[in-house]
């Protein structure tokens, strides 16, 4: 089904597209900050997603793909002060 065949005005199409983009952006941000797919499901439900198998599957998929900070060694070089004594 295409929007053109439904006779939906252009401004409604734009509005719906913005809602979808906002939801996707919000979902990705939440996935980056979540500690588990279950936590992400809870956050998505709080933002208006329905609690369903589709939401759980979406949360697991986006959680697996979202980059997150991992604890580890800081590889950025730092300045070290070395003192010499005579």
Image (tube, helix red, strand yellow):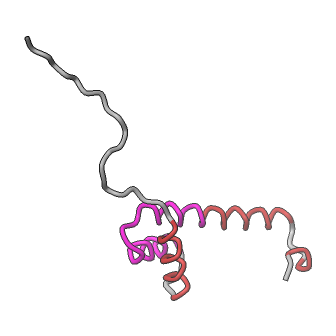
x 43%, y 59%: residue: 68
Residue 71 quadrant: bottom left
The spot of residue 73 in percent (x, y) is 30, 49
Residue lying at the far top in this picture: please name it: 86
Left or right for 86, reference 21: left
Residue lying at the far bottom in this picture: please name it: 53
| Magenta stretch contains residue 7 | no
The spot of residue 20 in percent (x, y) is 66, 67
Q: How many marks?
A: 0
Give above or below for 64 relative to 84. below
Residue 26 quadrant: bottom right
**Which of 32/2 is in front?**
32
| Magenta stretch contains residue 40 | yes
Residue lying at the far front in this picture: please name it: 86
Residue 74 quadrant: top left
**Highlighted magenta segment, given as a residue range:** 23-48
Give above or below for 78 relative to 46. above
The spot of residue 7 in percent (x, y) is 90, 75
Left or right for 66, reference 86: right
x 60%, y 66%: residue: 24
The spot of residue 16 in percent (x, y) is 73, 67
Q: Quadrant of the C terminus?
A: top left
Give above or below for 55 relative to 33. below
Give above or below for 25 relative to 4. above
x 52%, y 82%: residue: 57
**Which of 65/41 is in front?**
65
């Amino acid at each position: 089904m295409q929007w053109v065949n439904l006779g939906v005005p252009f401004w409604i199409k734009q509005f719906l597209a913005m809602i979808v983009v906002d939801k996707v952006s919000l979902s990705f941000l939440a996935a980056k900050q979540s500690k588990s797919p279950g936590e992400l499901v809870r956050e998505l439900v709080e933002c208006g997603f329905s609690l369903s198998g589709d939401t759980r599957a979406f949360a697991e998929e986006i959680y697996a793909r979202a980059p997150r900070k991992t604890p580890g060694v800081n590889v950025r070089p730092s300045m070290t002060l070395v003192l010499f004594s005579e």
